[in-house]
Amino acid sequence: MAPYILRRLLWLPVILLIVSFVTFVLGRYGPGDPVQVMMGSKYDPVAAERIRERLGLNDNIFVQYGRYLSNVARGDFGESLKYRGRTVAELLRSKMWVSAQLNLAALILSVSLGVPIGLFAAIRQGTLLDPAAVSMTLFWQSVPVFVTGPGLLLIFAKWLGILPTHGWGGFFDTRIILPAVVMGIVGVAIIARLVRSSTLEVINSDYVRTARAKGLPETTVRLRHILRNAMIPLVTHLGFSLSGLLTTSFVVERYFGVPGVGNLLIEAIFARDFPILDGALLIGTTIFVMVNLLVDLIYPALDPRIRLGQGNAAF
């Protein structure tokens, strides 16, 4: 296992180098001038040229990229072009932590509802309860967030008056409930269908019939033999979800007044704030690679037949 982990980790700098270079070049040669956006209606060509010279934007692209890599290696992602005097690390740290909490709450909701619904639908296959359960989750998935959000606000905030409407107070604050429900309800249908389809693949397996023939309680058969072996597709999906914890729905953030990273990235795109975009992409890529490595390490624990470095587990 150690050689496999080492081989995967050795690829991380290569992946980050490729991703950072492509993003860096696209940002510098893309449409729009960050200095012009920064100065706005007070744009002056002479002053703008001085700012470009001070920021190093007039240097050769490879010189700029080399300087950027040197700073990143020391943990310095640079200074925001839009929010002068504030570092990229400072801005992303606070915003990503907010988005991570919101996404985690939504993921907990999706898993806690999606897994039992999917397992229930698979066990009740052939009855009306199976399509009823799946249809219910698909209905909520098909409703867009700009309909779900106002609907929940109307019911729980205005009519019942039991939940706040906007703002942010942390993971254990009631203001996280409505945005987490709006984001998590979409994942319920995805997880329920994954669990249902994977459960149907293993429910008639020989080892399940053997477990029942031994007289094991049905609850033990379902949890230890059926659900455990049906978890691999779910673990893969959760891996992608966890790697995206630091991003969130821009619409949900704006609608519920959540100060997460979504609004920051949208503002950075319109302001051509390249340091924020580059930093966010590097951090996101690193998390994506590490979480996928973690998922690969979980596979053998769920199914001993899987060997790292072979078949689907190969890098």
Image (spheres, rainbow, N blue to C red):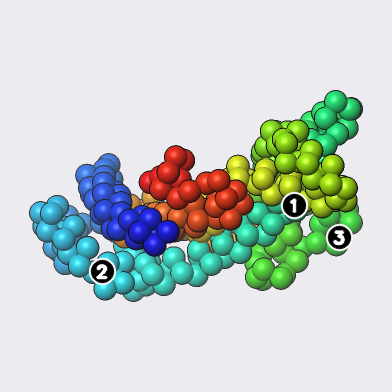
Residue 256: x percent and y percent? 66, 56
Q: Can see residue 255?
A: no
Name the residue beneath numbered marker 2: 73
- Nearest to the observer: residue 118 or residue 270: 118
Contact? badges 1 and 3 (CB < 8 Å) = no
- In three-dimensional space, the C-alpha distance between marks 3 and 2, rounded to whole angstroms, equals 50 Å
Q: Earlier in the sequence, mark 2 or mark 1?
A: 2
Residue 28 point in image, percent of width and height: 23, 49
Label disc, if present, on residue 43 of the rendered structure: none
| Residue 171 horizontal/vertical position (percent) | 67, 68
Camera-nearest label, 3 or 2: 2
Label 2 close to label 1 by CB (< 8 Å): no
- Number of callouts in the render? 3
Of 167 and 134, nearer the camera is 134
- SS state under label 2: helix
314 left or right, relative to 49: right
Q: The residue tagged with tag 3: helix, strand or loop?
A: loop
- What amino acid is labelled 3 in the image? Gly
| Residue 6 seen in the current view | yes
Residue that appears at 52% across and 46% down: 306
Label 3: few (<14), some (14–19) or many (≥20) C-alpha neighbours in 10 Å: few
The amino acid marked with disc number 2 is Ala
| Residue 224, label in figure | 1
